[in-house]
Image (cartoon, rainbow, N blue to C red):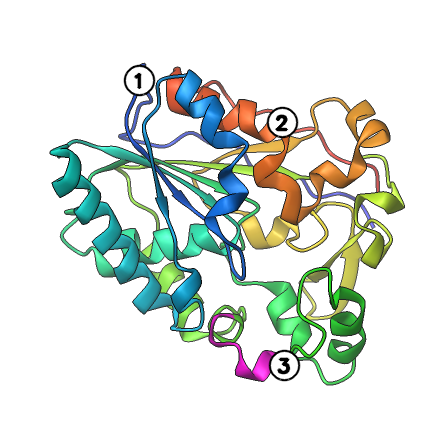
Amino acid sequence: MGYEPLPVQGRRGAILTNERLPAVLVHGWRSHPGIWNRLAPVLTDAAVPFWRFDYTGIQNAGTEAIALALQDCIHEKREETGYDGPVDIVCHSMGTCIARYLLEVLDNNREENVRLLVGIGPPNNGSALAELFNDPEQGPEVIRRLAGVFVPPDYDPGEDTIVQEFRPGSRTVAALRHAGTRDDIAYRIILAANRTGTPAFFPAFDGRTWELAPDGEWRTTYAGDGIVPHTDSYLPGAGIDVLPADPGNLVRHPEHYCHTMLPRNPEVIVRVTKYLTIFGEPAVRTPPRR
């Protein structure tokens, strides 16, 4: 199968500037704020203030509840610091969808003042893996391969609220699709691809990522990070970076580009910091080898 490139576009009505705005850091599903520990000192050195949102205690509460908790966190930080200007939001994985649900679905009056939303490996169109978990034929084997790597050994997707809410046909995903992105926010997506077809990129799936083909069949692709395929991430109007820029990085450290490692990846950190501190340059799209 051939590689299908994703369109790269700019955002209308949103320009990145040299201002150092506060960055709200939103971790992903079954993750924690510690994933930002390598980004945090770089932001400090760049004089970028940051607020970490921690929802580890309510991860099974559902998308809307977590999005409202994110809103509360931002409001509390504003009150604490006295800052009422625009903020940037940097998210990993499902955290992107939590932030988008707040900004696009719940914030109908656009009261949340956000300049830039950066999503690292986001399942914007719903998660193919969430659907695969629930597949009666493929699901048990996929879960077995990910046990201890991405899910606990006794993982039951039927008991996972977020996984059920982010199946591609869910009401939550439909609400995001219906709401659409905001013209007053710049969107940037950072993705990884196994451009060299290296199995060590994500050993559980031999370096590939599961995705749903247009005909509804399951297939695997190198255009993904082991967990999230590019087809899950595409967002109309968002600028897209696909890393690594140098395929040699996959030879040296292929594991740095899998989904769970992306927030700690040095190349990702450089890209995020650049977005937060200087005028945004056009995203570069280089396809992986299939």
Find numbered disc 2 in the image and state the secondary structure of the residue it sits on.
helix
Find numbered disc 3 in the image and state the secondary structure of the residue it sits on.
loop
Q: Where 286 falls versus 58 (above or below)?
A: above
Find numbered disc 1 in the image and state the secondary structure of the residue it sits on.
loop
Sequence-wise first label, 2 or 3: 3
Q: Say which residue appears at 83% left-offset and 50% top-offset.
A: 1
Amino acid of disc 3: Asp
Query: Mark 1 — residue?
Result: 17
Q: Quadrant of residue 200?
A: top right
The CA span between labels 1 and 2 is 23 Å
Q: Quadrant of residue 253?
A: top right
Labels 3 & 1 near each other (Cβ < 8 A): no
Q: Nearer the viewer, mark 1 or mark 2?
A: 2
- Most frequent secondary structure within the magenta stretch: helix
Q: Is residue 37 visible?
A: yes
Residue 111 position within the rendered picture, expressed as x and y whole percent measured from the top left: 14, 47
Q: Where 182 falls versus 64 (above or below)?
A: above
- Point out the stretch of residues depicted in magenta: 156-162
On screen, residue 251 versus residue 153, left or right, reads right
Query: Mark 2 — residue?
Result: 266
**Which label sits on residue 156?**
3
